Amino acid sequence: MKKITFSIDINAAPAKVWETMLAPETYKEWVNPVWPGSYYEGEWKEGYQLRFISPGHGGTLAVLEKVIPYHTISAKHIAIIRADGTKDTESEATKSWMGTTESYTFTPAGNGTILTTEMNVYPEWEKMMTNDWPKALASLRNVCEK
């Protein structure tokens, strides 16, 4: 796997960035420009599972390994969700995704926040993540700062 890191300065306190990033309605708003119609199911609590859904395409299933409110989130992807909603842990596509990790760190910086995203991905996902995540973070910044 390869580690890729993205960071963005947001002119909002860590609590506001956290709430905007994770609240169901604002989550849909900031991911929409990059992953149209996407949403999640579940709760952002340590040990819980989240289903990230892209309507018509399926999604991924992740377990939250660490959650420190307003500071840190770490997740590990454990399955792919097929377009029909069923969980896939056996296919070749899933094997190229399972074990992917992502973490978010919310660091206070003056009146704002530095949000850092760190991902460990298999090579076949690097290009997509490198293309999509900077756009997604810029969208999150726009939603937080409006």
Image: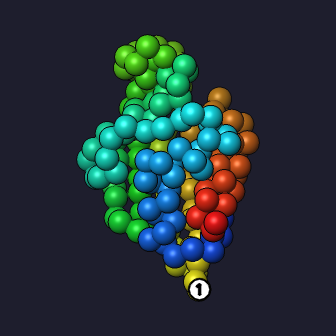
The residue under the point 37% across, 16% down is 86
Q: Quadrant of the C terminus?
A: bottom right
Q: Quadrant of the N terminus?
A: top right
Question: Is residue 115 or residue 29 the one in the foreground?
Answer: 29
Question: Is residue 46 or residue 142 the one in the foreground?
Answer: 142
Give residue 4's position: percent from left, percent from top.
63, 50
Q: Which residue is under mark 1?
A: 110
Q: Is residue 90 above or below residue 131?
A: above
Left or right of 54: which side holds 40?
A: left
Rendered image quadrant of residue 88: top left
Question: Is residue 128 or residue 140 the one in the foreground?
Answer: 140
Q: How many marks?
A: 1
Give residue 26's position: percent from left, percent from top.
51, 52
The residue under the point 57% across, 74% down is 12
Please indicate, yes or no, whether residue 88 appears anywhere in the rendered image: no
The residue under the point 73% across, 42% down is 131
Rendered image quadrant of residue 120: top right
- Image coloring type: rainbow
Give residue 71's position: percent from left, percent from top.
42, 68
The residue under the point 44% across, 71% down is 15
Please indicate, yes or no, whether residue 76 appears anywhere in the rendered image: yes
Element under disc 1: loop
Label 1 packing within 10 angstroms: few (<14), some (14-19), many (20+):
few
Give residue 123's position: percent from left, percent from top.
64, 33
Q: The residue under label 1 is which amino acid type?
A: Gly
Q: Is residue 49 above or below residue 14?
A: above
**Residue lying farthest to the bottom in this orientation:** 110
